[in-house]
């Protein structure tokens, strides 16, 4: 569905400068590329209307409102040219970049529309690359019924190899957890384009061909657990772990947490070089 102008209200009460800014941004995005679509995602009690997400062949950017800023986060901002230095937030990550706009500040409309067009072009190029023959075709996934959520809200996905079952799992992750799943998957793909994927025991697994699995993801009631099977060999060692687990270490990502993308990417690079887990 094409982008349509809406009220722009998010978690707060009546219309204010943030709503007006989102309406202005929405208009600029439509001017930059009329084919972009808008939807609302990640609704929660504190923000029942959700977050505006603008997409074309993948997410282009999101628009979040906070007390003092409107934050525009570009999913692949780190790889986009930004000669006018619009990005002023989330500069430490390997994937995302953000623009924080405060009350009274003006956005460089021309530069912003160019940035939107660059993001769309990047998405379209990535989509065209996906059309190339893969080394191993993904197992076909057919779903006729809604995915069942097990204990803790973990999606029940049949055992299968390839990206398709992993995406089915991520798309079924409830609420804010889906955003975490997509970010983790995106960071792994950017770091290891040839990563092997599968679903085992209702969890996405990531590995290196011939070495085995190095990481998996699992939904629990209040957080998403990302486990490195040889986490004790990573530097620094991920914080989660127990005495019963001699090698595995993990990170628990809660709703209010911000993933340290640089650290996570470093762990991925390290883990991919180690002998993986072979069940």
Image (spheres, helix red, strand yellow):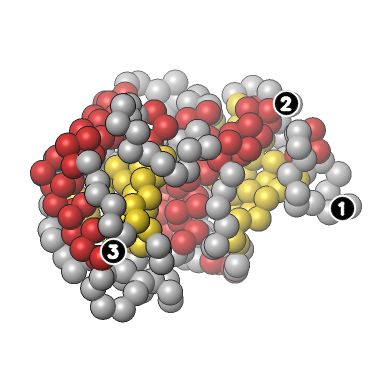
Disc number placed over residue 244 in the picture, else none = 1
Whole-number angstrom distance, CA of label 3 to CA of label 2: 47 Å
How many C-alpha atoms fall within 10 Å of the one at disc 2: few (<14), some, or many (≥20)? some
Where is residue 167? Give x, y as percent: 43, 46
Q: Which of marks 1 and 2 is nearer the N terminus?
A: 1
Residue 41 position (above or below residue 227) = below
**Residue visible at 33% across and 38% down?**
86
Q: In which quarter of the image is the N terminus?
A: bottom left
Please name whichever residue, 40 or 98, is drawn nearer the observer in this view of the structure. 98
Q: In which quarter of the image is residue 121?
A: top left
Can you identify the residue that label 2 sits on?
A: 274
**Residue visible at 36% across and 45% down?**
99
Please name whichever residue, 260 or 223, is drawn nearer the observer in this view of the structure. 260
Which residue lies most toward the right here? 243
Disc number placed over residue 18 in the picture, else none = 3
Whole-number angstrom distance, CA of label 1 to CA of label 2: 21 Å
Label 2 sits on a secondary structure element that is loop
Label 3 sits on a secondary structure element that is helix
Which residue lies most toward the front here? 104
**Residue visible at 23% across and 58% down?**
21
Answer left or right for 278 relative to 116: right
Count of residue discs: 3
Residue 152 position (above or below residue 277) = below
Where is residue 206? Give x, y as percent: 58, 37
Answer left or right for 181 relative to 86: right
Label 1 sits on a secondary structure element that is loop
Answer left or right for 183 relative to 64: right
Residue 193 position (above or below residue 91) = above
**Residue visible at 68% across and 31% down?**
271
């Amino acid at each position: 569905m094409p982008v349509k102008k809406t009220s722009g209200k998010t978690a707060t009460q009546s219309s204010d400068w943030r709503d007006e800014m989102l309406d202005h941004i929405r208009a600029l995005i439509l001017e930059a590329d009329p084919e972009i679509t808008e939807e609302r995602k990640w609704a929660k009690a504190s923000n029942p209307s959700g977050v505006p997400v603008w997409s074309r062949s993948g997410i282009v950017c999101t628009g979040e409102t906070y007390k003092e800023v409107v934050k525009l986060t570009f999913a692949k901002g780190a790889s986009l040219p930004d000669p006018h230095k619009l990005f002023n937030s989330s500069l430490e990550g390997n994937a995302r970049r953000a623009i924080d706009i405060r009350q009274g500040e003006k956005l460089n409309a021309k530069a912003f529309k160019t940035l939107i067009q660059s993001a769309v072009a990047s998405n379209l190029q990535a989509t065209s690359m996906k059309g190339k023959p893969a080394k191993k075709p993904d197992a076909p996934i057919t779903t006729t019924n809604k995915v069942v959520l097990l204990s803790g809200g973990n999606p029940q996905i049949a055992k299968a190899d390839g990206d398709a079952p992993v995406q089915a799992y991520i798309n079924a992750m409830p609420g804010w957890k889906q955003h975490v799943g997509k970010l983790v998957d995106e960071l792994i793909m950017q770091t290891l384009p040839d990563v092997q994927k599968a679903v085992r025991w209702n969890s996405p697994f990531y590995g290196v061909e011939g070495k085995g699995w190095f990481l998996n993801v699992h939904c629990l009631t209040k957080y998403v657990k990302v486990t490195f099977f040889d986490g004790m060999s990573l530097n620094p060692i991920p914080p989660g772990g127990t005495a019963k687990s001699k090698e595995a270490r993990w990170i628990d990502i809660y709703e209010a947490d911000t993933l340290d993308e640089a650290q996570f990417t470093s762990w991925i690079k390290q883990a991919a070089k180690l002998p993986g887990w072979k069940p």
